[in-house]
Amino acid sequence: MLFLGRRFSCILLLPLLGHAQPTDAPIMGLDELKPGMQGEVWTVFRGTTAEPFAVEVTGVVRNALGPGKSLILCQLTDDRVQKMGAVAGMSGSPLYIDGKLAGALSYQVQKFETVRYAGFTPIADLLEVGVQSDRAAALSAGDAGGLAALNTSRGQDALQPLSPVFAFGGISPRVVEWLTPQFSAMGLQVSSLGGQMSPAAAESADDHPLRAGDAVAVAVASGDITLAATGTVSYVDGDKVLAFGHPMMGLGNISLPMARAEIVTILPSNQSSLKVANTGSIIGTIDQDRLSAVAGRIGAGPEMIPIRITVNQSGEAPRTLNFKAARHPQLTALAVGSGTAQAVLGSNDAGLTNGAELETQFTFPGGEIVTTHALFSGSQGVSQGLADFTRDVGILLQNPYAAVYPTGIDVQVTPLEENPLTILEYVQLSRNEVGVGDNLSITIGWRDYQGKTGRDVIVVPVDAAWQDRELELVVAPGNVIDQLTGRTGTIATSQLRGFSAYLDFVRQVRDPDGLYVAVVESSKLFVDQTSETRELPGSLARIAQRSDQSRYQQRTTLNPLWEGRALQGRLVPGLIRKSFKVTD
């Protein structure tokens, strides 16, 4: 009786103790799946330890995602998940049936249904992405990746991927609100409910090997600012990792940091439930972003770009944000823009309402440096200017000539003591006819944002070579002078012959502040990459264009004979052109 009693007690305790997650589980094919089969899905509800929840197989939707790409449809029978539905952050949670690995949670089915369902990507499709990851490693794909993101914005279709939410840490909600449209334009969701794992939690997580069901993050930025999309590990084979069960952005070959993640809680919603996560240490590299999964390897993370953003507030010690950003044409630009926006919009500096000045230095391999300058006026101008700044960083990084990324980016932010917006009221010439060797005086009248008036005088020395030529005086901002003198701001890929020429093209831009005062004449401009020749003999121009029409171009523009600057440090929109004549 005593032996039987002990045995009976053990049997009663087994359900209470639970069971271990399957390890080295065999693969279950689609043909083995039958409606009514009971399964379990492993995911992290809180902390770093995965737990199972119950599902029931409804059936297989053949070719649901394209030819040969089916979807396993399951009812979420667990009470916890039935209330919240499939959750963003559960993407990739492995599905086990009869001890076999069948697939990974990946798709939301409807939004307001009374009975919750979810779609699962078959395990065979995930393993296919793993094969592509092996090929990428063999070919040293490195920083390869598409320049455009897959638009994963949600339409009216009931079937939607559990699109990862890019969560910020170290960024104020105001900045995230400002950034949301820029992420939405790329089809991405963004949240301010992100953070960093505590040192103790990170150390504890790193002591355990990464397993299927664990939370994992694709990190775009790490340091004082974090930006990461959290999902779930679907499959681990040695150092190989498959996760998400659907595309992150559909970028193909990539090189993004893979990081540990800790789940703080799940925010249930009738429309789109969300895991709130802290990002931990970088533990490897994600090198594939495909239809059925993201894939990568555990080990050293990819090379990242050090970014330093310094706010130079008058009378105070400089404040600095230091973080690293992933090397990707679009995501890097968003990380740099996010950090700069935090420095400008997310602080308590009342002085920033007047505007700000940005000096940004990009250092490239080989010591090549490109410096950009931006000036923002007022709070509204700051918001628009930061959007333009983020766009310009993206343009610089999306060069079509080489996969070259900066080795460092340094942004200096200086709040302005007064709004730099200035109105150009008039331009007067001392005379319309001027003799050789004389000086031409230019008087510029202006009014600042408070209505205070002023005037500046620019003296132009008259060159003897200008005699009897049809000349104009142009007073305008630098970008307008660029356009009038043949620099369009964009250039055909075929017109340049390499990355160095591209950087030279970027360096030639005139500063955005103040006014340029230019003496110009109309002339034919012959362009060879970034080199310009005025009035090249027609025979030579025709020979060059016949040899390479995409490289050599000829057009009529204004030729600057002399340039001066006025009202530097101010933003002065407008354009005034006046003719004058040089006589004996």
Image (cartoon, rainbow, N blue to C red):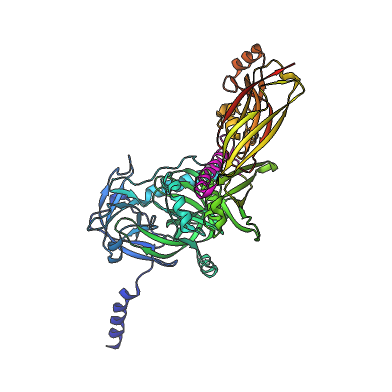
Q: On the rendered image, what quadrant is the C terminus found in?
A: top right
Identify the residue at the far bottom of this view.
2
Identify the residue at the far right of this view.
437
Answer above or below: position of 422 versus 434.
below
Specify whether residue 210 is in view. no
Q: What stretch is highlighted in magenta?
A: 377-405
Q: On the rendered image, what quadrant is the N terminus found in?
A: bottom left
Viewer-proximal residue, 181 or 302? Answer: 181
Viewer-proximal residue, 71 or 493? Answer: 493
Q: Where is residue 38 in the image (x, y as percent from the top left)?
A: 27, 61
Specify whether residue 470 is in view. yes
Tell me how many marks there are: 0
Q: Give the left or right position of residue 14, taking residue 307 as reference.
A: left
Q: Give the left or right position of residue 368, taking residue 556 as reference.
A: right
Q: Position of residue 403 (x, y in %)?
A: 58, 39
Viewer-proximal residue, 526 or 377? Answer: 377
Q: Does the magenta stretch include residue 401?
A: yes
